[in-house]
Image (tube, coloured by chain):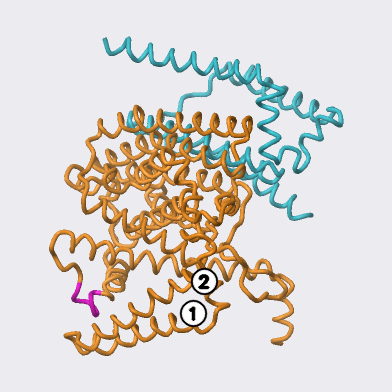
Chain colours: A orange, B cyan
Amino acid sequence: MISSLLAFLAEHAVLVIAIIKIALLLFIVLTVNAYLTWFERKVVAHMQSRWGPHRVGPHGLLQPLADGAKFLLKEDPTPAGVDKFTYFLAPLMALALALTSIAIIPFGPDPLPWTIWGQKVYLGIADLNIGILALFAITALSVYGVALAGWSSNSKYPLLGGLRSSAQMVSYELALTMSVVGVLLLAGSFNLRDIISAQAQHPERGLFGWNLWPQILGFFCFFVAAVAETNRVPFDLPEAESELVAGFHTEYASFKFAMFFIAEYTSMITVSCLCTIMFFGGWLSPFPASWTFTHYLPSVILIPFGLWVIWDGIRYETIFGRLILPGVGTAITAIGAVLVVFPAVNEFIQGPFWLLSKIFVFLFVYVWMRGTLPRFRYDQLMSFGWKLLLPVSIANVVITAFAMLAKSMWGAK
Amino acid sequence: MTPQLAIFFVLAALAVLGALSLIFQRHPIHSALSLIVVMIALAGLYLLMGAEFVAAVQIIVYGGAIMVLFVFVIMLLNAGIEERTSFSKLAGIAGIPLSVALLGFLAAAIARSNESAQAGLQTGALANTKEISTMLFKDFVYPFELTSFLILVAILGAIVLAQREKS
């Protein structure tokens, strides 16, 4: 019985592994999403001299769980006069498209050290030849979630929010697409793995080999346009709460609202991944390849952090915190110790470690901007997109193309 | 039936159903949504033929940019449900025979086309982005540039029309 099941699984190994990877990634992304809300609230709170969530669980760490339960249990009224089909379709579309885009991101250079049913298992679900184009295709469709939500709600403020978002997306998508052309020219491929390995041509240069330096204009345009595409501060005009109540999702409650929320945070993660992969060398270490001692950096960060969590935990004011936090700290310290003891694991973890660290930095920048920048005025938004961002990104393409031509003609290195 | 053929029939059915729904829906937004379904089904067909680049561009340009503009305009005008009008006689007399004739001509042309034309329809013939760009910028550079000139003229025309209305 079990052996025939195993034989069946082994026969369809590619599919089975893909499904397991999808389930795992979905779980990880949704958890990260939940804790991203906690992180955002904490960071913004500290920027504003507040404490942020700290009632539910130690340091408010169980707040995301409480929020999730609240979203599930709230009443979910459907307003009168909505276009039913579109009203239900919009949050589904937003969430599905946002989650799909994560599937294209590769999370590490090497396959797992062991094979499963004779298959090499890479970190990342779909390794597409047209990776970046597929991502743009998904982004291009994701505007419908917001626009249709605004339209179908049969309400003034959501309609205005939907209109704003579709105009904003159309305007910034051009700049977004043009700004990566420079990177594509340098890499000669749409594949995200190829784009990273094109930045690894000079391992001795470390972080100076990344696309960031030749493409600094492209990075500026890409990041601004991407923030605009994800509807985040300072480009969150579709949900500007001081003007439009809550913009496109005013009429949504309960879990349908949560779906828009999850979609927004997931696209933040996708954009952070893309910035990292295209301009910051993906999983490449910022140090020259000869500095092998930097491979202990994960442990050097994890062990003191774990010890600090233990120390903080035993002095925590609630009994629950005194029980939980030292346990978490011990786990973190143990992971750090395992990395020192097993060099093979440490080597494998290097790529994902750097990739995730850089993604984390970008997520922090997102939150930082939210805590710092005021919202654009609508006409400023439009003139900024069309009159500055688009020309600069086109100029970047021309400059990159000419630089590459000159390099190939006069063979400078 | 190979999996490819099965997927082809699913996508083709989706495209035809989307097109029919586009005509028979009474609300402009629903028609626009049906058109998006058609565009995505077509992109899936391109993908099935191995033309990854064309498939992605189909979704980005048609599914994304152009249809967003359609939806935007419909939302901006706040267009309501359309009235059904009685079927025009001209459509009945000339339209249906003409469309049947067009379908026949296209089918005959595809059926009788020579090997080289059919080779273009085979899997993977235009898969490579490099080949597409070589073709566009080397073999067909003059038609390509002419087309972009035409688009430029159209953009200028749109700006002139918009400006005239303002003043």
Tag 2, which chain?
A: A
The image quadrant of residue A320 is: bottom left
Circle 2 residue? A349
Task: Please state which of residues B6 and A389 is positioned toward the viewer in this rendering.
Answer: A389
Q: Residue at x 59, y 68 (%)?
A: A19
Residue that carries the numbered disc 1 in the rendered image: A339
Mark 1 vs mark 2: which is more N-terminal?
1
Q: Amino acid under label 2? A: Ile
Question: x and y percent of residue A317 in the render?
Answer: 16, 85
Left or right position of B45 against A232: right
Three-letter amino acid code of the residue under disc 1: Leu
Label pair 1/2, CB-CB below 8 angstroms: yes
What's the magenta region?
Answer: A54-60
State the quadrant of the N terminus of chain A: bottom right
Question: x, y percentage for residue B73?
Answer: 38, 29
Question: Which residue is located at x 59 percent, y 20 percent?
Answer: B91
- Is A58 on the left-hand or right-hand side of A90? left
- Determine the CA span between mark 1 and mark 2: 8 Å
